[in-house]
Amino acid sequence: MHQKTREQFLARLQPGVVIIPAAHEATRSNDTEFPFRQDSDFQYLTGFPEPDAIAVLRPGHEKPYVLFVRPKDREREIWTGIRAGVHGAVDEYGADEAYELGEWETKLPELLRGNRRVYVKLGHDAAVDEAVIRTIADLRRRGRQGVEAPSEVIDPAPILAEMRLFKRDEEVGILARACDISVEGHLAAMRQTRPDMNEYEVQALVEYEFRKRGASAPGYGTIVAGGANATILHYVENNRPLRDGDLLLIDAGAEFGAFTGDITRTFPVGKKFEGAARDVYQVVLDAQHAALKASKPGSTLDDVHNAACRALTQGLVELKVLEGDVEELLREHAYRPYYMHRTSHWLGMDVHDVGAYVRDGEVRSLEAGMAFTVEPGLYFHGDTAAPAHFHGIGVRIEDNVLITPDGHRNLTAGVPTGIAEIEALRGEG
Ligand code: GLY
Ligand code: MN
Ligand code: MN
C-alpha cells in the first residue's frame, strides 16, 4: 500500500527531490516520553514506525526511495525496543537505500545537487528546514565548479493533503475498522454507565474496549462530560461524578492502523431522557438527520452545515429559545450562542484531517471517497438568554460518513441515536 502511495504521489510532482521527516518523540516528564505517534504524512508514504527517520524520494531515479533511520544500538534496544536499522529499512520497509541518521547531513548535498526543485514540508521540522536551506546555499557557492543548486523549494503538504482527502479502498477498510472499534467502545459505555460512576470510570470502559479490539490508542483525548461539562466543547478533565437526571456526552474515537474514528453520543445517566434534556436531544437528532441527508456527492460541507443550522434554528424556535422567522433567524446566525462550531471536518489519519475545504475561493463539492464527520450540537451555558431550565444541557451527536457514488455510508451507525433505541440499551449491561 505504501509503495503504491509513493508512486501515486511522485506521479503528481515535477522532477525534483522530496524530503519527508518522521515525527520525534515528545517528553512527557523528565526522561519519559508520550507514547510515540508517527507523523501522518510520513506514515502515509512509508509505513515506517520509528521516530526521527527521514525519507528522501527521487522521482525518475533508479533508486527512488532512500530512508535515513536510527542506527541499530544493542544498549538502546535493550531499554527501548528493537530498531529496524538500515537493513530492516531495506528488507522490511522497501527502501531502495538506507543510511544511519548520522549520515543525513553529509549525504544531503549529493541528494540535492543537480535537482532544480526540492519538495520539503516547510515550517514542519526546524532542523530539516535549516539543513536544506544551508545545503542549498553551500551548493550555490559551488556554482562555478559546475554544481547545479536547487532554485525552487516547494511545500508538498497540499499535494499530500489532496491525496489523503480521497480514501482508497484499502484505506476505507482501515477507517471502517477504526470506526467499528469506536462503535464498540460507545456501546459498552451506553450499556454499562450507571449513576454515581465517575467520568473517568466511563473513560476507562470506552478505552478498554478500544484497546481490547486492537486499537493503538484513542485518536484524540477522550471526552466524557456529565451534565454541564458537556457544554465545554473539548472538556478533557473527565473527573466528576455522574448524577442521575443529567445527560452524559461521550466524544471518543479509536485509532487503528493510523486512522481514527470520531463518534459522539449523548445519553441519560439514568435510564430515560427527561424534560428539557429530551426536547433538546430531539432537536439535535433532527438536525443530524437533516445533515446526513445532505451528505451526498455534489453537495458541499456548507450544504451539510446549513441543513443542520436550519433544523437547529427551527427547533430552537419550537423550544422558545429563539423567537421570530426561521429564515430571518438563520440569516442573523441567531443559533450561534448555542451552536458555535461547524458541523463537519474531514476525517482520516488525523481526527481533523488534512484536505482543502475551499478551492479557488469556492467551497468544494463532495465526491466519492471523502470522509468527514456530521456533528451538530446544542450547548446551553448558564449565561445565555435561553430559559433557565435549559442551562447546563449540552448535546452533540457525531457520526462518520464516507461519500459513495450514490450517497454516503454511515460508518458509525452501529451506535444508536434514536431515543427509544438508546433507552433500550440503557436498560442492559
Ligand atoms: N473530537 C473532536 C471533534 O469532534 O472534532
Ligand atoms: Mn468528536
Ligand atoms: Mn469531530
Image: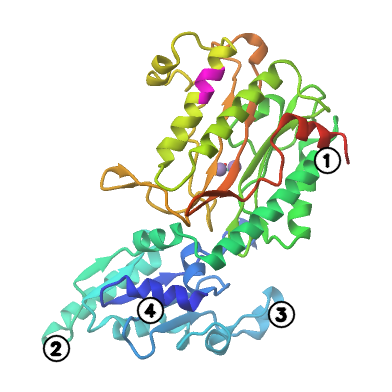
Disc marking residue 146: 2
Q: Which residue is mark 4?
A: 57
Q: Is 272 inside the magenta-drawn segment?
A: no
Nearer to me, 53 or 353? 353
Q: Is mark 2 within 8 Å of ligand 1?
A: no
Marks 4 and 2, Cα distance to the nearest angstrom? 24 Å
Task: State the residue at coordinates (46%, 8%).
Answer: 324
SS at mark 3? Answer: helix
- Figure colour scheme: rainbow
**Three-letter code, disc 3:** Ile
Q: Amino acid at mark 4?
A: Leu
Left or right of 110 in this view: 35: right
Asked if the residue at tag 4 contacts the one at tag 1, i.e. Cβ–Cβ closer than 8 Å, the answer is no
Task: Write the residue at 59% across / 37% down.
Answer: 234
User: Eyeballing the image, is 35 above or below 284?
Assistant: below
| Cα distance between the residues tagged 1 and 4 | 49 Å
Nearer to us of marks 2 and 3 is: 2
Q: Disc 4 or 2, which lies upstream in sequence?
A: 4
Q: Picture coordinates of residue 113 (x, y %)?
A: 25, 83
Label 1's element?
Answer: helix
Q: Residues within 10 Å of mark 2 (few under 14, many from 20)?
A: few
* Label placed on residue 78: 3
Along the line of sight, the residue nearer the viewer: 419 or 30: 419
Picture quarter containing residue 25?
bottom right
Disc on the earlier residue, 2 or 3: 3
Front position among marks 2 and 1: 1
Q: Is residue 113 above or below residue 256?
A: below
Marks 3 and 4 close (CB-CB < 8 Å): no
Name the kind of residue labelled 2 in the image: Gly
Mark 4 burial class by Cα count in 10 Å: few <14, some 14-19, many 20+: many
Tell which circle, 3 or 4, labels the residue nearer the N-terminal end.
Answer: 4
Q: Which residues are magenta?
A: 311-315
